Amino acid sequence: MTGADLHISDIDTPAVLIDLDRVEANLARGQRLADAAGLRLRPHVKTHKLPRFAQRQVALGAVGITAQKLGEAEAMADGGLADIFLPYNILGAAKLDRLAALHARVRLSVSADSAETVAGYAARFAGAAHPLTVLVECDTGAARCGVQDPAAAVALARAVAAAPGLAFGGLMTYPPRGRLAGTRDWLAAARDLLTDAGLPPPVISTGGTPDMARMAELAGVATEWRPGTYIYSDRMQAGWGHGTLADCALTVLTTVVSRPTPARAVLDAGSKALAADPVASGGHGHIVEHPAAVVAALSEEHAVVDLSAVPGPGPRIGDRLRVIPNHACVVSNLFDHVHLIRGERVEEVARVTSRGRLG
């Protein structure tokens, strides 16, 4: 939908605003960092969930995109994206059938961290017109999914390479924030073992937004970087040193609906609009118009704001405030549409095409 001369003041609240100038600056900066480090960029679309922005990332130089769930990847394929990585164990007949249908439409790769996942892929893709590319997921310290040591990575890579309908595509990891040296050592050891075994990894995929400024530390080992939040940034990323609040492109537009006491205001955006992810500095978002205010508590439909440090009378009932959320990715999944703005004008009301695609 176009903005059709819509002004921010015309938008009902709560609503998501996306500053297009900040988006463009963030995307360009991320691509420059990857180019300087000699790494290919494969952005994660979970943050924005909009084919429009995924297409822009590719136009700026990304080799393709990352989508966390099958439904998200399907929505991106519908939006014209042609090279998609799914860093997730896909299990069960229904999902494998959907994966096969997607594999017939786009250049697709997936991950696995167990023999069971590999066996499921092999059973479904044996006899496929072209093989399914599978990367071995490695736990380099984040303690989530992944094989636990380089030798296990080699064993699973051999299983992939030997399976009908599959092709070994390399290694992938979601690295622990701030521990790039350990990630580099883990991946380098796995790469060397694989090369000695006659299975040199074509791709070594890693990375996220928090350590983007340091991605050059993995040059010579990693081949691609998968940032997500860098397109919008948020209060969490700024707290970790990725840019500042001035770089944050996503805000939630809210209305003050109550002033029960001089030191307290209540907004019409609770956990269903701001999400509830914590940050080290406390609070549930940054209010742009009143930086000293603290979003102290969330219920489902209300945000309770502590105004005790705000000079003067503070916001009045009916005032509209913009909140930079702690975690932008979750907020994207809470709204059916977002408002793409330049200044105070709305250029487009965009449908969030992969909202709720959790499977």
Image: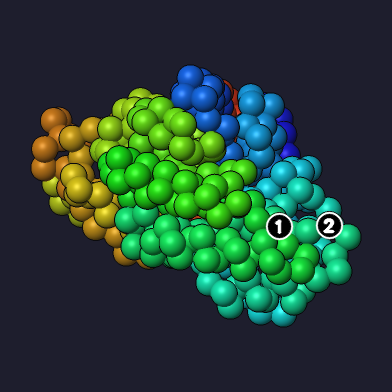
Query: Three-letter amino acid code at disc 2?
Result: His
231 or 298: which is nearer to us?
A: 231
The answer to whether 211 is drawn above or below residue 273 in the figure is: above
Coloring basis for residues: rainbow
- Residue 158 in percent (x, y) is at 60, 63
Ranked by sequence position, the earlier of labels 1 and 2 is 2
Q: What residue would you read off at disc 1?
A: 167
Query: Taking 181 as reference, is 32 left or right?
Result: right
301 or 188: which is nearer to us?
A: 188
Query: Three-letter amino acid code at disc 1?
Result: Ala
| Residue shown at 73% from the left, 62% from the top | 166
Query: Taking 268 as reference, is 112 left or right?
Result: right
Q: What residue would you read off at disc 2?
A: 130
Which quadrant of the structure image shows residue 167? bottom right
| Residue shown at 27% from the left, 54% from the top | 278
Question: What secondary structure is found at the residue carrying circle 2?
Answer: loop
- Residue 248 in percent (x, y) is at 41, 32
- Residue 259 in percent (x, y) is at 24, 49
| Residue shown at 47% from the left, 46% from the top | 192
Question: What secondary structure is found at the residue carrying circle 1?
Answer: strand
